[in-house]
Image: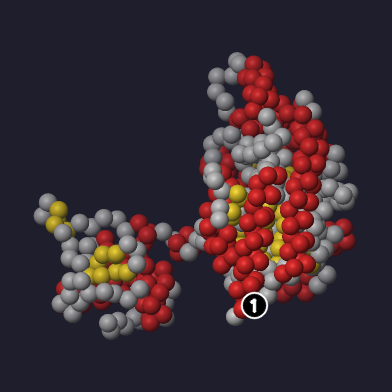
Amino acid sequence: MNIKINKNEKVPLYLQIYEQIKSMIFAGTLVNGSKLPSERQMAENLGVHRNTVKRAYSELRDDDLISSYQGQYYYVSFGTMYYGMIKRPVNWEALIKDDYLSFDSHFDELFNKSYEEDIISFGGGVAARELYPHEEIATVFEKVLAKRKDEAYFYTPYQGDRELRSEISSFISKKGIIAKPANIQLFTENNQAFDFIMTLILNPGDKVIVPEALSPDIYRAVQFAGGQLLTIPMDENGMICENLSALIEKEKPKLIYVDSSFNNPTGVVLSMERRKLLLELSYKYRIPIIEEDEGSELYYEMDSIPSIKSMDTGNNVIYMYSFSLTMMPGAGISFLIADTSVVKRLSEMVSMKIVSLDWVPQMLLLEYMKEGLFYERLQGFRSIYSKKRDLMYDYLEKLAADVGIKCRRPDGGVYMWVKLPAGMDGRELLKEVQKAGVTFIPGYAFYPQSHLGNDHIRLNYSYPTAQEIEDGMVILDRIIRQTQQKIQKK
């Protein structure tokens, strides 16, 4: 098949491919049943992105000129008539932006498996189920309804319930952060809050400093807003900040993002020295810091470290906190603290995009906080999470001694960051483990450049029960050992 494209023409590349294949079909050069090159092969032959070929094939298929066989290959077919017309349905894939066609949903699929039956999931990052009994939730919610019985509709202000924001103001004062309710904006989750900030502040081409590794929710939000990532390596003390001045002066970043307490996925805590250094850089170069701090309550042996926001006298830090690890799973509530001008604009965006924040989680959290139950639960979470951590780490410690994995025992948080033995690939390991009913998140998902991180995996211990950790780690232990034996035999 002789297809020639001109990248200097104004005609989109996918249309050039489409028109030439269409002409070959009508000319009889490509007869009915002729097999076409795969998307990947055609893309390599023409030196274009695979999505370009995908769009061309999709257009041809919608014209009933080609068909696909079980998603394996494409072949020439002829259009059928419908009431005297050739069917030309909308080519939806051609309308979707390339960024979303290229979206790697593997992380999201694995995360969602946390909720499936018959799966032991080390992939999630949500709260334990044990500490919020159904009967207690029902009782608390009954109190909420009794207090609010005169309300006709369960709507909250765009900024979030005023009483809950006052309660949160009291909560964060214990963390050394002074903020009025007017400085607090409620959201469903931190990734939603971060996405709103990117939409509000970032212009295409703006650069954002981030640690590497980091949550896919963060780097996707930057990329979808048209921003560029400046990834900074991490060590045992968090993001390496000592030489950032030269980078800042050269690249002129718009923002600095940091996950300061028990980073997702590594479990590392940003040291006090580096927190102070980041704040100094923020003041010197007038760069806002976005600090994510949801793991800060989940410390086990060590004492909590003051947040960057608690030291911020210049109001340069936007602070994000989520209750996803300390409220009942699925409650969905977080908050953001920022300058009132930022909060006002975010609230206006909520009014346009969401209309009303979820009423039920806000009222449940408010009642739990006012009655002191939430603070009791925090102690329970620290106790149960530390036991689960130790249970999982005991298995990993044996694997470290026998097959050479590397994993530090985190001082808090909910994640184990495991370096696999030389030659072992996290993606391939996942395939084998899933066959046995266990799942985790392979390390590449936490790197914007997905060719990195293949030698790591992230294990979560907050959501699975102690028995599920026991059963799942027995399976993981066995398959890692078997995989290591196969590697050694090669």
- The residue labelled by disc 1 is 488
Answer with the quarter of the image where residue 70 lies. bottom left
Q: Badge 1: how crowded within 10 Å, few (<14), some, or many (20+)?
A: few
Judging from the image, the colouring scheme is secondary structure
- Image point (74%, 73%), residue name: 247
Q: Specify the amino acid type for callout 1.
A: Gln
Whole-percent x, y for residue 193 in the image: 64, 47
**Can you say whether 284 is above or below 362 in the image?**
below
- Residue visible at 18% across and 80% down? 29
Q: Position of residue 55 (x, y in %)?
A: 35, 66
- Residue 1 is drawn in which quadrant? bottom left
Instruction: Write the residue at 17% across / 62% down.
Output: 79
* Residue at position x 56%, y 48% in the image: 119
Nearest to the observer: residue 98 or residue 2 = 2
Between residues 201 and 426, which one lies in front from this camera angle?
Answer: 426
Q: Secondary structure at mark 1?
A: helix
**Image: 290 above or below 335:** below
Query: Viewed as shown, does residue 154 lie left or right of 461?
Result: left
Image location of residue 310, percent across then percent down:
84, 48
Judge left or right: residue 170 versus residue 405.
right
Quarter of the image that includes the C terminus: bottom right
